Amino acid sequence: MILRNGRVIDPSSGIDGIGDLRIEDGRIAEVRLGGGIPTDGHFERDCTGKVICPGLIDIHVHLREPGQEYKEDLASGLGSAAAGGFTTVACMPNTTPVIDSAPIVRDLIARAKLEKGARIQVIGALSKGMKNTELAEMGDLKAAGAIAVSDDAYQVQDAGFMRKAMEYAAMLDLPVLAHCENTSLSDGGVMNEGYTASVLGLKGLPREAYEMDVMRNGLLAMMTGCHLHVLHVSTAREVEIIRFLKSLGAPVTAETGPHYWCLTDEACKGYNTNAKMNPPLRTQTDCEAMIVGLKDGTLDCIATDHAPHAAYEKAQEFPLAPFGIHGLETSLALGITYLVKPNHLSLAALIGQMSTAPARILGLPGGTLEPDSVADITVFDPDAEWVVEPEAFVSKGKNTPFGGWKLTGKPVMTIVGGEVVFS
């Protein structure tokens, strides 16, 4: 296949210009700025006006399989990822049963290969059953194909246990992906603690509950030498803490998601459960801090925390509805609309945050258009305007606060290992 006349952007090599890209045997064979790659019998696709870039990678996704297929399954989740321009997604272990054993990891990887869509990477559980009492068999998980460990939705409260977990993870060269929250402070909260929560009569989630845990886990990372990746950063002070930890040489990386730079807790007005997530939406000051953190590199990458739920679950009273929103099919457009168009980030920087950086953080293939690298490629129209229609999502999860929003930027083709999986 030859992709012709597109704007080729590869943050890993600094390439940004109009040209052609040739794929052979599932790998990138050649990139030629200025075009002119000979046809030689290849199938061709005209990409005039489109961007050709390394496939987008999301390292924080809930695919819900096994056991919660009514929310999402491999077919719908990996298909949704491809429709959003993602060529690789890393799935979280809070399933039923928990992904805490080698057979579950091997089964997920094997069955995902049968589906048409993004490729899967599996994050294993940090503890058995995600109960924070007994370490999972991390060595077996890694041997089966897990790339990292996390107790995401069931955050570790015991610092001694977390230290032991990090020591084992460091020995195995497995990153620990941590949802940082002190539940003794946040217990029972359902949205950001502040004015809006008071008006709505809802119990708040104080920002300090998250910030103190980021600091604790960062210090433990320094103590153990373990690579800590902080999931879904949402407060301005968290950004400051991560910046401070990095200045000390801590082995820490961090992410934020689109909803944390373009929504505030006011989206919860009217008891809108599609704006309920954990960590919660914060304030405009926090939104601005996320943008600064992305610009100066304090926040290393963008992840969606894609968390699909059934419509009837989100239709409950606000305190009873589950946390989480759909993320895969709106992420790129929210980045272009709210980061690139206002000149907060260049298009190349956004692609770096959504492709090259995630690959680097977890040591994944992809994230580059270098010759002989895997042909995972996203082609998108940076100027396409569209309206978010949740019912049109490939995902089973329609729970988005962005329904009806007019966004700019749309994937037009997703290629995984040289195969077109979305067009």
Image: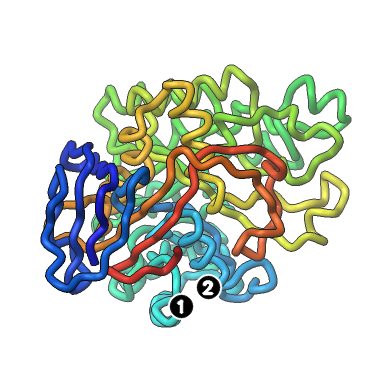
Q: Is residue 280 left or right of residue 411?
A: right
- Residue 364's quadrant in the figure? bottom left
Nearer to the camera, 5 or 66: 5
Residue 372 location (% of width, % of height): 12, 62
Q: Is residue 126 at all visible to an observer of this figure?
A: yes
Q: Is residue 333 left or right of residue 253?
A: right
Q: Residue at x 15, y 52 (%)?
A: 31
Q: Which residue is mark 2?
A: 74
Residue 138 against residue 9 in the figure, above or below: below
| Label drawn at residue 17 | none
Q: Residue at x 52, y 20 (%)?
A: 288
Count of marks, rendered view: 2
Q: Amino acid at mark 1?
A: Glu
For label 2, the SS is helix
Badge 2 or badge 1: first in the primary sequence:
2
Q: Quadrant of the C terminus?
A: bottom left
Q: Which residue is mark 1?
A: 115
Nearer to the camera, 131 or 203: 203
- Residue 254's quadrant in the figure? top left
Residue 242 against residue 256 in the figure, above or below: above
Q: Is residue 159 at all visible to an observer of this figure?
A: no
Q: Residue at x 27, y 51 (%)?
A: 367
Say few, some or many: other residues with alpha carbon within 10 Å of mark 1 (under 14 / 14 to 19 / 20 or more).
some
Q: Amino acid at mark 2?
A: Leu
Say few, some or many: other residues with alpha carbon within 10 Å of mark 2 (under 14 / 14 to 19 / 20 or more).
many
Q: Residue furthest top?
A: 285
Q: CA distance from mark 2 to mark 1?
A: 7 Å
Residue 323 location (% of width, % of height): 69, 49
Nearer to the camera, 46 or 360: 46
